[in-house]
Amino acid sequence: MAEPVVLFEVKDRIATVTLNRPDRLNAFNAEMGTGLRQAMEAAARDAAVRVIILTGAGRGFCAGADMERLSGAAGGGGASIPPEAPAPLDLGGAARADFQHRYSYFPAIPKPVIAAVNGPAAGLGFVFACYCDMRFAGSEAIFTTAFSRRGLIAEYGLAWLLPHLVGPGHAMDLLFSARRVSAQEAERIGFVNRAVPQADLMSEVRDYARELADAVSPRSMRVMKQQVWEALLGGLGEAVELANEEMRASFKTEDFREGVAHFIEKRAARFTGR
């Protein structure tokens, strides 16, 4: 039996989701799209999971859409491209419409999603890295939008998302040229949070994820993630109003009481997320 194209593992309150077509540099196909969405929903629903890591098996993160699929579209078989409008995430709550498109659902996941970019992240793989909340890159990571060199455009909301990450000038450069960007340059322009030696990538990401899982309130992370993504789509006044509302709610939570208690008692925190 063939291995699944998306692997899912939970350890130390960290879910690791691995794109698993290493012989194709994890080129993306429909089966992988379904598996990725299912894994992300499972991690989001699992109360034992506090942080999610997305990475790729072998030498690549995700080399983009499988070229066989693109070849079919180029030959007039446009129906081979999956249609839009998937079902909303099944997370027990309503996600805003912006986060219900085919690949824009990561912001609706109420936990930090960290990309551990271990190799080429091209095209659709670049899009997935953008939708993660943070990006760590190994020294062998290469980023390219790829679209302009395939006669395509800024897909899946990238024209909105990328300028928010790196500014309009860098976004135009990366989209127009589709040039290859190293991990070091990606860190310099603010696209990745950290560029680290390749051999240290997963240990660095896991150490950071473990700190989030062990030392901070999962409720705080959940609310702050919502605040940041909502603020990108709104104005300052809306951000202030939401902050005031959420601060009042925070004062009534177990995590607030624990946050004060562990500081005063000088002990490790025991947050519950409630």
Image: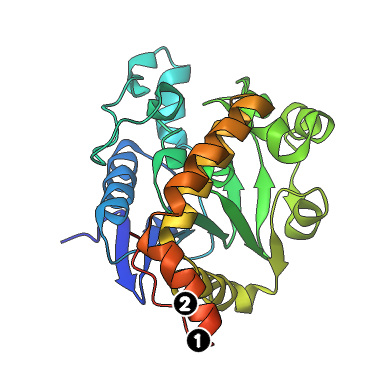
Task: Kindly check if marks 1 and 2 are in contact, taking CB atoms under 8 A apart as contact.
Answer: yes
Pointer 2: residues within 10 angstroms few (<14), some, or many (20+)?
some
Residue 48 to residue 90: above or below = below
User: Which of 183/188 is in front?
Assistant: 188
User: Which of 156/223 is in front?
Assistant: 223
Residue located at (51% from left, 47% from top): 247
The N terminus lies in which quarter of the figure?
A: bottom left
Quadrant location of residue 258?
bottom left
User: Which of 186/131 is in front?
Assistant: 131
Quadrant location of residue 154?
top right
Whether residue 238 sits left or right of residue 21 in the image: it is: right
Residue located at (24% from left, 38% from top): 90
- In the picture of the structure, the residue carrying the numbered disc 2 is 261
Residue located at (41% from left, 33% from top): 68
Across and down, in percent, residue 139 comes to: 70, 67
Q: Is residue 26 visible?
A: no
Q: Which mark is residue 265?
A: 1
Residue farthest along the left direction in this orientation: 1
Amino acid type of the residue tagged 2 in the rendering: Ala
